[in-house]
Amino acid sequence: MILGIATVVVLVLVAVALLPTKKRDRDGNNLNFTQPFVRPTNFRQQQLNEEAEAIADEYQRRADDAWREELGEKAATLLKSKPATTSRSSKS
């Protein structure tokens, strides 16, 4: 019974893992897909775009760091407030 359930779970997980991959491959091999026209930009515009991306990346990194720090503080608070009631029953 448990082996059957485990087999079904594994098959479902494998199917879920493979479906997005096949969709990406199909999308990548689509011959009817046309690339959007990219107009050439001058050097200054390229610099501005790269600088904007760098600023956005830095902002995202700082936001992620702040979120991780806040999450760590909340986790520590929750772990401290949790009563330490670990009872172990020994079966002999």
Image (cartoon, helix red, strand yellow):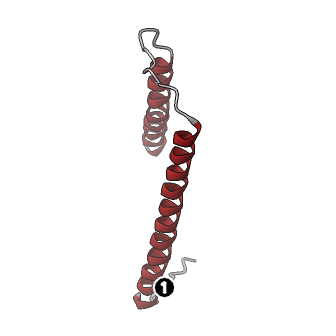
Look at the picture and state if 39 lies above or below 67.
above
Q: Quadrant of the C terminus?
A: bottom right
Q: Is residue 26 above or below residue 68?
A: above
Task: Check disc 1 and report its element: helix, strand or loop.
Answer: loop
Q: How many marks?
A: 1
- Residue 43 place in picture, x, y as percent: 59, 38
**For residue 25, above or below residue 54:** above
Q: Quadrant of residue 67?
A: bottom left
Q: Residue at x 44, y 20 (%)?
A: 37
x, y (%) of residue 4? 45, 38
Residue sitting nearer the eye, 90 or 50: 50
Q: Residues within 10 Å of mark 1 (few under 14, many from 20)?
A: few
Identity of the residue drawn at 40% across and 90% down: 81
**Which corner quadrant holds the N terminus?**
top left
Residue 83: tell me if it is visible: no
Residue 38 position in % (x across, y down): 47, 24
What residue is disc 1 on? 86
Q: Position of residue 75 (x, y in %)?
A: 45, 79
Q: Nearer the viewer, residue 9 or 68?
A: 68
Residue at 44% from the left image edge and 77% from the top image edge: 70
**Residue type for callout 1:** Thr
Residue 78 in view, yes or no: yes
9 vs 53: above or below:
above
Q: Residue at x 44, y 28 (%)?
A: 19
Depth check: 88 or 59 in front? 59
Q: Quadrant of residue 16?
A: top left
